[in-house]
């Protein structure tokens, strides 16, 4: 009987289910969508690529405006390249643990980039026909220069750095700083009074410095010259319909409450591995049981910018271990041992999916962290700047890796940490567990992103998803006016009560004095 019921259920729902996700209904029509990432780095663009390809697969007309060279794709995607003026030279190791330098760097990059973008013929052409698009998709940070395109048009953002408390507050969802961390800082439990106070200060300071002091005001000044009738950039930003967040509760330090307009699509870019290039696969065939270590500092932090003292530590440590090492590095390294292969570019997900790879040595970038979790690889993380320290703390808190400080690094510590990660089975076991949780979703992140993108278009911007809190000032949201009014009445009541008591007390004393005289 149970078998009959199961067969009936499968026949009823089978046509609507695909492996690991709910199938999407065919779109009502082909939509025209422009992805604006004029200043987003490679790692950020990698979040947009699977979404662009998925939308193109649905028959939509997808266009991308970026300063980066076109990426290879078999889909029908139009890619516009603006080019880019040379940004100021900056060694990411120099801004380690210095958010002030990071913000200054953003300003130095974005101001000339704003001027350059709006002077290019392709940007002018797209701006002139912007009202022909059904939807714009924008990176949620460091692309404010693109806001003139989306003024009075439906647009959504992609939160490439995951849960961002500042962006969430803009949606009207203020995350509690007693336990929710900012993208620039993470505090580890127990959350003492000092740690919570520090976290609160960071929640307040970073949005103020970015939005009102350093970055946005500088970009706003340039935009106002080019588009004098345009509303303030922050007002345009608040009109976004929805954000696709590159996060998932399994990969975050804390589970946070979200609005319907905040959709988690974390690890959308992750995919099953493909066969390795022949030269790499041939080199790994002689690996044996000792396995392989994969080492990469990502696309923004170039290995060649690593100080020589650190590079020499890795060279010495790698020469003393049994494992083979695949190292993403842009230049020749002298005195490299035979068990190390260096390449300028490597197929990271294909390498991480290979069962011969035992651990991943990383800087803690969010995309690389998600890929390591997806492919269940323990991580040795060496955070440098930005959200990397927060990601490192998340890795440690979930028991899937170990974090080291660059200042403490030496060959012995590096070898001991590698040995611990490989030999202590708890790290691999925890990685397997988190990977299963991340993969176990009713709808794939990519399908979810496609659904909500089309949803916003179908419902003319989906204003019904907007929280009323997004339109409140901080005074109204925090009820400061009511609190002040209540305090006013309390003070007035206290003053009146005090005055009445004083009058009664005087009368009592006065009547007592008169009575004494009569006696």
Image (cartoon, helix red, strand yellow):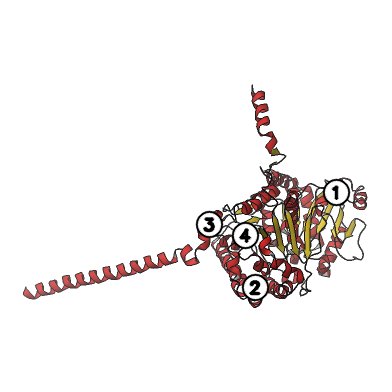
Q: Nearer the viewer, mark 2 or mark 3?
A: 3
Q: Nearer the viewer, mark 2 or mark 4?
A: 4
- First in sequence: mark 2 vs mark 3: 2
Local packing at callout 1 (Cα closer than 10 Å; few below 14, some 14-19, many 20+) is some
- First in sequence: mark 2 vs mark 4: 4
Q: Which residue is mark 1?
A: 291
* 433 lies above or below 138: above
* 239 lies above or below 231: above
Residue 399 lies left or right of residue 201; in this view the side is right
Q: CA distance from mark 1 to mark 2?
A: 46 Å
Contact check, label 3 and label 1, Cβ < 8 Å:
no
Res 491 → quadrant = bottom left
Residue 309 lies left or right of residue 149; in this view the side is right
Q: Position of residue 360 (x, y in %)?
A: 79, 54
Q: CA distance from mark 2 to mark 3?
A: 27 Å
Q: Nearer the viewer, mark 3 or mark 1?
A: 3
Towards the viewer: 517 or 362: 362
Q: Which residue is mark 4?
A: 154
Towards the viewer: 130 or 9: 130
Contact check, label 2 and label 4, Cβ < 8 Å:
no
The numbered disc on residue 215 is 2
């Amino acid at each position: 009987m149970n078998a009959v019921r199961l067969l009936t259920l499968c026949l009823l729902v089978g046509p609507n289910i695909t492996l690991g996700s709910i199938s999407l209904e065919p779109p009502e029509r082909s939509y025209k969508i422009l992805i604006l990432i004029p200043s987003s780095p490679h790692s950020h663009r990698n979040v947009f690529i699977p979404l662009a390809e998925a939308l193109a697969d649905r028959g939509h007309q997808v266009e991308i405006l970026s300063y980066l060279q076109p990426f290879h794709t078999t889909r029908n995607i139009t890619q516009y390249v603006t080019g880019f003026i040379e940004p100021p030279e900056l060694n990411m190791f120099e801004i380690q643990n210095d958010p002030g330098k990071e913000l200054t760097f953003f300003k130095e990059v974005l101001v000339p980039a704003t001027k350059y973008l709006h002077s290019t013929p392709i940007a002018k052409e797209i701006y002139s026909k912007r009202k022909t698009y059904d939807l714009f998709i924008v990176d949620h940070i460091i692309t404010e220069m693109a806001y003139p395109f989306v003024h009075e048009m439906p647009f959504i953002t992609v939160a490439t750095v995951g849960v961002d408390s500042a962006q969430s507050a803009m949606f009207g969802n203020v995350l509690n700083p007693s336990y929710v961390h900012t993208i620039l800082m993470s505090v580890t439990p127990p959350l003492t009074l000092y740690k919570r106070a520090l976290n609160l200060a960071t929640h307040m300071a970073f949005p103020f410095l970015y939005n009102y002091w350093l970055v946005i005001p500088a970009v706003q000044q340039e935009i106002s010259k080019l588009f004098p009738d345009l509303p303030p950039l922050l007002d345009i930003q608040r009109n976004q319909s929805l954000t696709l967040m590159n996060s998932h509760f399994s990969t975050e330090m804390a589970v946070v409450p979200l609005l319907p307009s905040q959709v988690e699509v974390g690890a959308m870019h992750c995919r099953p591995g493909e066969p390795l290039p022949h030269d790499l696969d041939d080199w790994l065939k002689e690996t044996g049981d000792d396995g392989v270590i994969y080492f990469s500092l990502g696309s923004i932090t170039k290995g060649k910018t690593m100080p020589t003292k650190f590079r020499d530590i890795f060279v010495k440590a790698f020469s003393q271990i049994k494992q083979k090492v695949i190292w993403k590095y842009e230049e020749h390294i002298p005195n490299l041992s035979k068990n190390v292969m260096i390449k300028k570019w490597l197929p990271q997900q294909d390498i991480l999916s290979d069962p011969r790879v035992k651990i991943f040595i990383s800087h803690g970038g969010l995309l690389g962290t998600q890929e390591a979790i997806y492919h269940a690889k323990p991580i040795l993380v060496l955070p440098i700047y930005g959200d990397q320290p927060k990601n490192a703390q998340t890795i440690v808190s979930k028991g899937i890796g170990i974090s080291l400080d660059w200042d403490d690094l030496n060959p012995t510590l590096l070898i001991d940490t590698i040995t611990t990660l490989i030999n202590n089975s708890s790290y691999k076991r925890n990685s397997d567990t988190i990977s299963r949780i991340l993969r176990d979703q009713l709808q794939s992140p990519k399908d979810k992103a496609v659904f909500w993108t089309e949803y916003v278009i179908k419902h003319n911007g989906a204003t019904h998803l907007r929280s009323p809190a997004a339109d409140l000032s901080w005074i109204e949201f925090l009820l400061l006016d009511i609190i002040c009014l209540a305090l006013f009445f309390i003070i007035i009541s206290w003053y009146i009560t005090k005055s009445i008591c004083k009058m009664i007390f005087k009368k009592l004393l006065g009547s007592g004095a008169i009575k004494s005289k009569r006696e």
